[in-house]
Image (cartoon, helix red, strand yellow):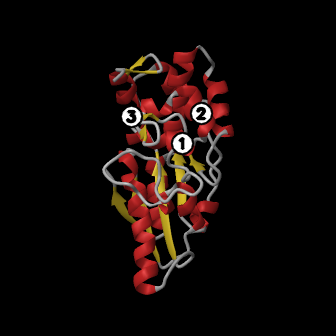
Amino acid sequence: MSDTILNVPRRDFLAGLAAAGAGVFAPVAAFASTLDDSRFRVKPDEKWLDSLTGKYKQVFDMPNPTHGLGLIHIRNYLKAWKDNYNLEHPQVNAVGTLYYMTIPLGFTDPMWAKYKLGEAIKETDSTTNAFAVRNIYQKADPGATTLSIKGIANWPADTSMEALQKKGALFIMCNNALNFWAMNVANATNQTMEAVRAEFLAHLVPGVVVVPAMVMAVDQAQAKGCSYMRMA
């Protein structure tokens, strides 16, 4: 297994991402300057918050992919309300967070192939037994009954982000963590951060909402009445 992520030492890359995801920014001048640079911000849009109108609603805090553990919890949450109380969206809301090592889950296949994102987050495509070069979380293969995620179990096809979105689940992405990924990829590939960030934003999974900061977004969701569940 490689100890580098796009030629950036894995230890340094993960340390920086951990800091970004936690809201305590890494002591890297190049990244710190982005916090004051309007080019790397997103305009607050509270439409996603306004959509949280259900009586029952929960935030699923997913800092790590963990081979689909966060997604199966969202699936089980929605399924349990439907099976036991015949309640579904919009009476029930689920919000999945994308930050730290789950940022790649919010990008479509071209970004996974170009920047080896499967290797970066150590996620294997079960159809190839190699690091994924496509977003194995976004949707199931046509006709497949399970996702192509190699992990502790074969998750049902309706565990995919696309399937969960169709059931009303919402996925939000941290802009601070997005910027840190863009900065590291840019440094490793001799590009500008502006170019990589624009490329990432152009390849967002449909429906994913970029929020200014996850630490704030979770608080906002809880103010709307969401409960909170932390994933590994």
How far, Cα to Cα, is label 2 from label 1? Answer: 9 Å
- Indicate the quadrant where residue 135 lies: top right
Q: Are marks 2 and 1 in contact (CB under 8 Å)?
A: yes
Which residue has dot 1 on it?
135
Question: What amino acid type should be assigned to the residue bearing mark 3?
Answer: Lys
Q: x, y percentage for residue 149?
A: 43, 47
Q: 207 or 51, which is in the foreground?
A: 207
Residue found at the very far bottom of the displayed protein: 85
Element at label 2: helix
Label 1, secondary structure: give it. loop
Question: Does any portion of residue 181 appear in the rendered image?
Answer: yes
Q: Position of residue 109 (x, y in %)?
A: 60, 39
Q: Quadrant of residue 75?
A: bottom left
Question: Are the two marked residues, 2 and 3, in contact with CB atoms closer than 8 angstroms?
Answer: no
Type of residue at label 2?
Met
| Camera sees residue 36 | no
Mark 3 to mark 1 CA distance (whole Å): 13 Å
**Residue located beneath label 3 in the image:** 122
Mark 1 or mark 3, which is nearer the start of the sequence? 3
Q: For numbered disc 3, what is the local secondary structure?
A: loop
In the rendered image, the quadrant that contains the N terminus is top left
Judge the density around disc 1: few (<14), some (14-19), many (≥20) Cα neighbours within 10 Å.
many
Identity of the amino acid at label 1?
Asn
